[in-house]
Image (cartoon, helix red, strand yellow):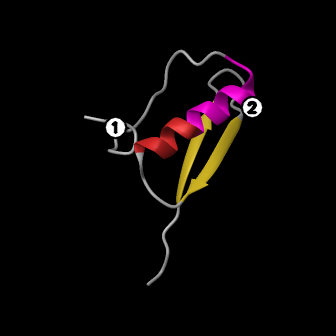
Amino acid sequence: MDKKYYQITAIYEYSRKRILEIVDEKRVTNTRRFIEILKEKMDLKINTVQTKNGDEFVNN
């Protein structure tokens, strides 16, 4: 069976800088970890996250 991978991409609206992460599962925990990586790499306070509202981004 082939392994699937997914890409999470963040784009900073002001500079258009992109940061991406490759993950092996669509999970809320991967998204949370990615946001922590963003805070560290971009050295910015994150006020808003825009998503397509997939299950990996919202925890209903």
The residue that mark 1 highlights is 53
Is 10 situated left or right of 59 in this image? Answer: right
Q: Which residues are magenta?
A: 34-44
Residue sitting at the far left: 60
Q: Quadrant of the N terminus?
A: bottom left
Image quadrant assignment for residue 54: top left
**Prevailing SS of the magenta stretch:** helix
Q: Which one is in front in this view, the residue at disc 1 or the one at disc 2?
A: 2
| Disc number placed over residue 10 in the picture, else none | none
The residue that mark 2 highlights is 41
Q: Quadrant of the C terminus?
A: top left
- Write the residue at 53% across / 15% down: 47
**Amino acid carrying mark 1 in the image:** Asn
Is 31 situated left or right of 41 in this image? Answer: left
Is 48 situated left or right of 20 in this image? Answer: left
How far across and down, in percent of the image, does residue 3 sit?
Answer: 49, 74
Q: Secondary structure at mark 2?
A: helix
How far across and down, in percent of the image, does residue 12 sit?
Answer: 64, 27
